[in-house]
Image: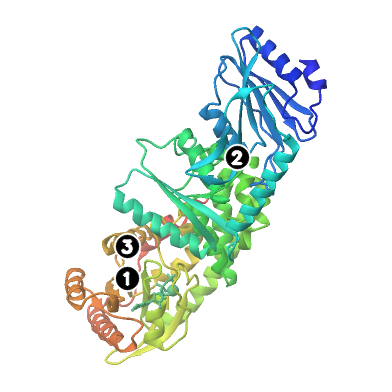
Amino acid sequence: MERLYRRRVPTDKVVTNELARICAELSFETRRQIGLLIDRQGHIQSVIIGNDHELVIPNLARSRSGLRLLRGVRLVHTHLHNQPLTRDDLTDLALLRLDLMMAIGVGKDGRVQDVFLAHLLPQPKQGKSCQEWEPCSLHGFQLDCQDFILSLENECTRTNIGLRKGKESSRAILVSVSTERASRRQEHLDELRELVRVSHIHVVDSIIQRPHALHPKYVLGLGKLKDVIIQALQTGADWLIFDRDLTPAQVHGISEVTELRVLDRTQVILDIFAQRAHSRIGKVQVELAQLRYRLPRLSQSNTAFSRLAGGIGSRGPGETKLETDRRRARDRIRRLEAELVAVSRSRQQQRNMRSRQAIPVVSLVGYTNAGKSTLLNALTGSSQSAKDRVFETLDTVSRRLYIPDRGEIILTDTVGFIRQLPEDLVAAFHTTLQELKFADVLVHVVDARTPDPDRHIEVVESILAQLGFDTIPRLMVLNKCDLLPADQVEQMCHRYRAVGITATQGETVEDVRQALAHMLNRLDREGELKGRWGADRDTRFMKAASVGVS
Ligand SMILES: Nc1nc2c(ncn2[C@@H]2O[C@H](COP(=O)(O)OP(=O)(O)OP(=O)(O)O)[C@@H](O)[C@H]2O)c(=O)[nH]1
Ligand SMILES: [Mg+2]
């Protein structure tokens, strides 16, 4: 073995005839594959001994900057029965981005028979990421190794720049792995696409997998995962974004196979919150959620997890803190919690003032992007930001509104909900969500145009129930009715017992005002406007809000 390490291959050769001969002889004697990892200066970096049909490549030095460049080492290894390169050989070539992959076929007499060579293609051709050469004898094999690798790498860099034209700095492949029915999977994927879009990541491809069971370590089967990674490398993606939450073990498992950055749905949502949090309270709550999410993952594997910490998922208020260890994270969590308690107290005082003045409070709730802020603006003439992107509103905003036949009310707009709103976020947004507890009426705004309004309603209702607010009287409002035919709007309003409006057209919101006046007057008559929030609602809310606190 020593004699192999001492040799150096001239830079214009893939391997010398003598080295090939020694490896073939050793293989023949030991009935094992022998592999050499050779760098561009011709030094032998590693000698690998496999079994009779495969060998395991050791962890290679990983450099993120050169993710789509070549690795700087080639693998030359023996095949005991003169077989061509296998699928595993080609997968390793693509996954590890080796300079070259060569197999030296060992003949029945223990001598070198044929050589088999493959290299990456700068751009995939007919779905293939590698090019295999015709087998030939070692003597007949001609290639200026250094020249070839350098021009291949130049070509890879050029195509890479081509792929990266445009404004987006990051590219992602979305991976949906679920056992749900097809239409729902597609809907969830569309939602993830939207979440990723507002994170300024360009989606280059998406993959839907429906396995019998989720793999505990890789989510998908290992073979499928490798295919996805190769596809990502071919399309210039640097992120794999999963439409589900990954366990710390899965993050670790996937990161062992690839250097691509791995994100799950919760991290995407946390990142959007981090970008949108402007107020001090919003920032504190987001940082708290980020820390609580990371805490259990810190103990697993810092190296695996550090791949997640390089960009989104660690942006915003928590950026530097995410590098802290468990103890420091815990300390920080405690400090943030104390800060939130102080804010809650001062808000409570404001509310006491309000309740002394006996002004009813009406809160807008609903799925994100349903049109809550637009409705607040239309009703109160204010100018809350209402853009076509999810989680536009994070901080609660209150406005006074005069309603004829009723008088003054306080209307509040708050953070929108989403399917599987991360538990850590619900818990961290305790202070914001607490505002809802004091509402006399919740106006549930539903986007009528969404493909599955029932599902959105169900998600919102279940979060309200989880928080203990399901007993607060509701007014259901179907918004964006301008986007549907009138008869469909009528049917839906009847079905959901809702008021149909187009919040962007001010005059239609008059119906909301009337319905509110009617409802508040009725509640007043029934003595329901004051003192309804008893101990029961308080306890349930506190319980839901403390989920995830460690
Ligand atoms: N066509 C149409 N678009 C609407 C209507 N109401 C709101 N929108 C649009 O829907 C998008 C989202 O509106 P927002 O008011 O920001 O929604 P939101 O519920 O406050 O969203 P979050 O704050 O993210 O929870 C914006 O682009 C609005 O212009 C409507 O009645 N018709
Ligand atoms: Mg809003």
Is the distance from the Cβ of mark 2 to the nearest ligand 1 atom less than 8 Å?
no
Numbered mark located on residue 447 in the image: 1
Left or right: residue 404 versus residue 58 is left
- Quadrant in which residue 470 is drawn: bottom left
Question: In the image, what residue occupies the spot 53% across and 45% down?
Answer: 124
- Quadrant in which residue 517 is drawn: bottom left
Q: Is residue 445 visible?
A: yes
Query: Can you identify the residue that label 3 sits on?
Result: 456
Is the distance from the Cβ of mark 1 to the nearest ligand 1 atom less than 8 Å?
yes
- Quadrant in which residue 143 is drawn: top right
Give the percent coordinates (x, y) of residue 276: 54, 68
Left or right: residue 16 versus residue 515 is right
Figure disc tally: 3
Secondary element under disc 1, as helix, strand or loop, is: strand
Identified by mark 1, the residue type is Asp
Say if 34 sits above or below 245 in the image.
above
Say if 107 sits above or below 298 in the image.
above
Give the percent coordinates (x, y) of residue 199: 53, 62
Query: Which is nearer the N-term, disc 2 or disc 1?
Result: 2
Query: Can you identify the residue that label 2 sits on?
Result: 120
Mark 2, Cα crowd under 10 Å, few <14 / some 14-19 / many 20+, is many
How far apart are labels 3 and 1 at the CA level? 9 Å
Question: In the image, what residue occupies the spot 43% across and 73% down?
Answer: 388
Whether tag 2 and tag 1 are in contact, CB under 8 A, the answer is: no
